């Protein structure tokens, strides 16, 4: 049995032979060594490997690789799906996302971005403008609070009823100081119905 460990100075892998010594006796009439049956404890020692040994081996292998010069372009990534990804592969505010080829890539998420897949292409860190385009929210999709038995329940209804009542000029309001107000002459316009071609009236 071998026991690998890391040299604290060189960080190299040291392997020591822990195989139990062969035990026996020499016969006065023979030069052969008598057979030896390993005890249960010796068998366990031969078969036992600690998690510390495994970590030491993996750590030594990892540190011995020159990752700066490793070419990953020929790797069959399908074989690695499900394996752990080392922390060193991530930059700040990044996630792992599979592209259209099925290969995992690091995706950095900038401030005020949302992870999304738009109409086509890979998963991206989308801007607010791109999200608005994707959602395509209409005035009819936005509900409003209704008062009593109001006949409108979304922003589009509100625009139809009230959005076309426009003050063109004048209409300044002054406090008279005696509980009344004065309103300057004004010119306004509104539509008679919510139709875009409705007859308009001035007042």
Image (cartoon, helix red, strand yellow):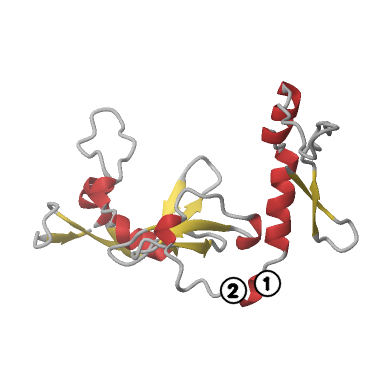
Residue at x-position 68% and y-position 59%: 61
Q: Nearer the viewer, residue 89 or 137?
A: 89
- Horizontal side of 122 relative to 23 (left or right) equals left
Q: Nearer the viewer, residue 171 or 193?
A: 193
Q: Nearer the viewer, residue 95 or 83?
A: 83
Question: Are discs 1 and 2 less than 8 Å apart at CB?
Answer: yes
Residue at x-position 45% and y-position 72%: 74
Residue 70 circle label: 2
Could you say whether the residue bearing mark 1 is in a helix, strand or loop?
Answer: loop
Could you say whether the residue bearing mark 2 is in a helix, strand or loop?
Answer: loop
Above or below 92: residue 146: above
Check the image and name the residue furthest to the right.
Answer: 9
Q: Position of residue 82 (x, y in %)?
A: 47, 48
Q: Position of residue 40 (x, y in %)?
A: 71, 22
Residue at x-position 43% and y-position 61%: 77
Above or below 176: residue 132: below
Q: Which residue is mark 1?
A: 66
Quarter of the image with the C terminus is: bottom left
Q: Position of residue 71 (x, y in %)?
A: 54, 75
Q: Does residue 186 show up?
A: no
């Amino acid at each position: 049995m071998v026991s690998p460990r890391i040299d604290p100075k060189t960080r190299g892998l040291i392997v020591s032979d822990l195989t139990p010594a062969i035990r026996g006796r020499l016969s006065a009439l023979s030069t052969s060594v008598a057979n030896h049956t390993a005890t249960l404890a010796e068998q366990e020692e031969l078969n036992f490997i600690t998690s510390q040994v495994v970590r030491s081996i993996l750590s030594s292998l990892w540190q011995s690789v020159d990752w700066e010069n490793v070419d990953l372009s020929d790797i069959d990534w399908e074989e690695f799906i499900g394996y752990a990804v080392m922390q060193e592969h991530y930059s700040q505010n990044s996630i792992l996302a599979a592209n259209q080829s099925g290969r995992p890539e690091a995706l950095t998420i900038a401030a005020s971005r949302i992870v999304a897949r738009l109409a086509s292409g890979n998963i991206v860190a989308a801007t607010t403008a791109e999200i608005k385009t994707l959602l395509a929210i209409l005035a009819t999709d936005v509900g409003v609070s209704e008062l009593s038995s109001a006949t409108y329940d979304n922003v589009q209804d509100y625009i139809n009823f009230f959005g076309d009542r426009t003050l063109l000029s004048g209409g300044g309001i002054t406090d008279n100081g005696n509980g009344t107000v004065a309103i300057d002459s004004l010119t306004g316009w509104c539509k008679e119905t919510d139709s875009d071609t409705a007859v308009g009236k001035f007042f």
